[in-house]
Image (spheres, grey):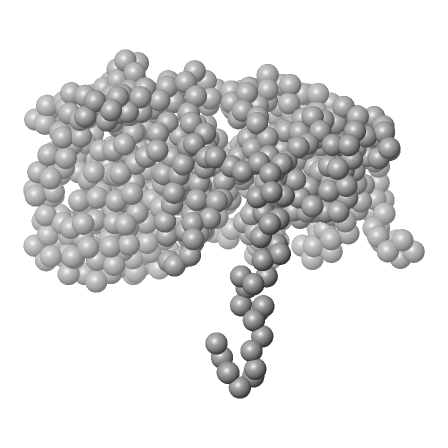
């Protein structure tokens, strides 16, 4: 695999995961469990969609096929999307959303930490900027996991169930393929093995602090997004998100 | 406006002679443009009316997020999506600034929100209209925020200091909202295809009259206005504000190359203002009474958010209490 | 339903300036109040530092006491530099 082609794929993965999670968070607007939480979810979604734009703008330059970041995000079909299965899962209740968010934030934090020292200057710059935002995301979602895990009996049960149900989508981020290996070897991408060890230790510690049980690490993990094989959730999300550009091809907004 | 029908409970103004010494002292302060701070003495009616007005204003900001959220997940590109999200989020923030000002009067936010959910207290009628195409995101920013800004600019001088301070902050932040909306429309008219241009005109046709209704009934039908004006809670009459809005909006409408659904709309050189047709007040009162296209949906959404979030808020409180106990024990 | 606490929020807008009162937030505890204040009052880079204080813990002076508290300082003009007139020859002091 050529390095450029691998880099394009890699940038799509980074951009798409941010985009899809940002879109999911937009669905919460106007319906958060507290007004203060509306503000927090809005800031979070703004950060993630902003990061998605940076990654996809770079992806468009690397691809060099005349696509814009907008076209990559708003016209690519499901099978060409590269976001993690984790982030496309439906919002569910607030505990479900928080479980998804925390498991992603914990990964995102270590990933951007690693990418900040990428040999690709552009990757390093986008990662370093994003890392500041994600450090705060992680702090917030960690605090919520503790509040819900160690709050009331009801919140504890909901939080535990949320972790248990989303868990099978958490392992995919560490399953390396050729793209990961080519870029890690070149010092552009992150080596996923050390990332996984950091993630597991952090998640186990936080869940313990939150009085929650960490599901078995060796449990079977769903996979496929790196080849564009998604759950049934993504198609509907894209149908909504891409409605206008698809209904009015070539129109300018 | 965002608070269209605020009952002051007063149908006739007291003269200075009829007032108690405290009331007279209060009114003289207001007349001298001295701002009232939370701990100052104030007539009960002033406090009650302000709570009502500020809470309606705050509720409008919060409910007003919903018609825009309706297109947030369908915004057509990065730029529009980020702008719209930032704007909707600002509205949430403005609701919170206003609740914060309201709480300085001794009102409880949750109690006031419960009144919204029970239908006892209203929010602006405009948010009971649906957003049916993307151009509505432009029209809402341009006409709806535009109408709100005309009112809010004047309210920066309102007599109650925390309300005035909130308005100043809100006006500063909202300056981008109307531009954001107008730019959406201008772009569609200048760079759009026929279908997109048709969206714009359709959107203006639907929002024009409801936007004019935002300023509330005619002055002659606003029995509470006199007291609100005397207290300087309100600083310009409904009809004056409406006229000001129309005068500044029509040139912008012409620049878009669109028309208003009002055959009577034309410049009157003698008055130095635009003349316009009569508002359908039966529609206005129907919507205020709860019969607008979206009244039920909007309230249901807000009620559900607070109800379904109660276990989350309780958990946070329980966790905080545990932490405090642990800290005390340590 | 358990009520959250009302906290007053103070923002330092720039290094070297005082914290200034900007409004309030609701939160279950102080840590959450800080986060909520960050989300609400610093969306446009308005701050470099935040304080949150439970509103109930603030003691305020009463407006009724305005005269005894503050008027006595009105006539102490000798506390202000402009009160002291010096010959021009002294230069800047």
- x, y percentage for residue A114? 15, 50
Q: Is residue A5 visible?
A: no
Q: Identify which residue, B316 or A162, lies in the foreground.
A: B316
Residue reaching furthest top? Answer: A153
Q: How many marks?
A: 0
- Left-right relation of B6 to A55: right
- Left-right relation of A127 to B133: left
- x, y percentage for residue A45? 38, 41
Q: Identify which residue, A174 or A241, lies in the foreground.
A: A174
Residue at (13%, 29%) from the top-left corner?
A: A204
- Left-right relation of A20 to B138: left
Quarter of the figure with the N terminus of chain C: top left
Residue at (16%, 57%) from the top-left corner?
A: A118
Q: Quadrant of residue A20?
A: top left
Residue at (58%, 47%) from the top-left corner?
A: C70
Placement of B120 over or under C26, stated as above or below: above
Q: Quadrant of residue A226?
A: top left
Q: Is residue C11 visible?
A: yes
- x, y percentage for residue A39? 43, 37
- x, y percentage for residue A123? 23, 57
């Amino acid at each position: 695999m050529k390095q450029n082609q691998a880099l394009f794929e890699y940038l799509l993965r980074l951009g798409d995961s941010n985009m899809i999670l940002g879109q999911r968070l937009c669905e919460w607007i106007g319906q958060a469990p507290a007004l203060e939480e509306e503000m927090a979810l809005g800031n979070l979604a703004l950060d993630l969609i902003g990061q998605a734009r940076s990654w996809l703008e770079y992806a468009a330059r690397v691809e060099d096929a005349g696509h814009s970041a907008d076209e990559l995000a708003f016209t690519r079909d499901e099978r060409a999307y590269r976001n993690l299965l984790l982030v496309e899962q439906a919002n569910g209740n607030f505990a479900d959303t928080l479980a998804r968010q925390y498991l992603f934030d914990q990964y995102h934090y270590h990933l951007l930490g690693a990418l900040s020292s990428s040999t690709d200057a552009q990757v390093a710059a986008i990662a370093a900027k994003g890392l500041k935002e994600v450090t705060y995301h992680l702090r917030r979602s960690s605090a919520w996991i503790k509040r819900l895990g160690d709050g009331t009996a009801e919140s504890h049960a909901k939080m535990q169930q949320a972790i248990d149900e989303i868990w099978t989508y958490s392992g995919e981020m560490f399953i390396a393929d050729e793209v990961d290996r080519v870029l890690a070897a070149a010092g552009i991408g992150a080596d996923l093995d050390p990332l996984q060890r950091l993630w597991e230790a952090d998640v186990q510690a936080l869940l313990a602090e939150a009085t929650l049980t960490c599901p078995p690490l060796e449990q079977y993990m769903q996979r496929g997004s790196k080849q564009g094989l998604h759950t049934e959730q993504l198609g509907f999300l894209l149908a909504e998100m891409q409605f206008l550009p698809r209904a009015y091809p070539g129109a300018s907004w | 406006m965002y608070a269209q029908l605020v009952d002051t409970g007063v149908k006739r103004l007291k003269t200075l002679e009829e007032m108690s010494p405290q009331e007279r002292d209060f009114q003289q302060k207001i007349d001298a443009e001295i701002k009232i701070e939370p701990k100052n003495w104030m007539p009960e009616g002033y406090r009650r009316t302000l709570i009502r007005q500020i809470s309606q204003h705050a509720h409008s900001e919060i409910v007003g997020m919903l018609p825009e959220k309706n297109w947030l997940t369908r915004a057509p590109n990065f730029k529009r999506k980020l702008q719209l999200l930032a704007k909707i989020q600002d509205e949430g923030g403005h609701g919170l600034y206003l609740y914060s000002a309201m709480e300085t009067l001794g009102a409880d936010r949750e109690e006031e929100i419960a009144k919204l959910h029970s239908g006892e207290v209203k929010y602006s009628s405009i948010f009971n209209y649906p957003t049916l195409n993307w151009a509505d995101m432009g029209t809402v920013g341009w006409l709806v925020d535009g109408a709100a800004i005309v009112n809010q600019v004047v309210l920066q001088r309102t007599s109650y200091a925390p309300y005035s301070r909130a308005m100043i902050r809100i006006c500063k932040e909202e300056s981008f909202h109307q531009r954001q909306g107008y730019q959406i429309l201008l772009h569609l008219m200048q760079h759009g295809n026929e279908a997109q241009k048709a969206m714009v005109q359709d959107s203006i046709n639907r929002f024009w009259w409801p936007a004019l209704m935002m300023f509330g009934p005619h002055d002659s039908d606003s029995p509470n206005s006199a007291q609100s004006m005397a207290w300087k809670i309100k600083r310009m009459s409904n009809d004056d504000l409406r006229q000001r809005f129309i005068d500044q909006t029509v040139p912008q409408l012409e620049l878009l190359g669109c028309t208003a659904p009002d055959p009577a709309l034309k410049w009157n050189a003698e008055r130095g203002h635009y003349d316009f047709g009569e508002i359908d007040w039966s529609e206005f009162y129907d919507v205020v009474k709860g019969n607008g296209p979206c009244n039920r949906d909007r309230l249901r959404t807000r009620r559900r958010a607070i109800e379904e979030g109660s276990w989350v808020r309780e958990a946070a409180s329980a966790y905080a209490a545990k932490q405090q106990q642990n800290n005390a024990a340590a | 339903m358990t009520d959250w606490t009302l906290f007053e929020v103070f923002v330092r807008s720039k290094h070297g300036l005082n914290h200034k009162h900007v409004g309030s937030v609701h939160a279950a505890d102080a840590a959450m109040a800080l986060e909520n204040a960050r989300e609400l009052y610093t969306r446009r880079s308005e701050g470099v530092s935040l304080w949150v204080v439970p509103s109930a813990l603030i003691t305020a002076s009463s407006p009724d006491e305005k005269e005894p508290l503050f008027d006595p300082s009105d006539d102490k003009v000798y506390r202000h530099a402009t009160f002291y007139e010096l010959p021009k020859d002294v230069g800047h002091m």
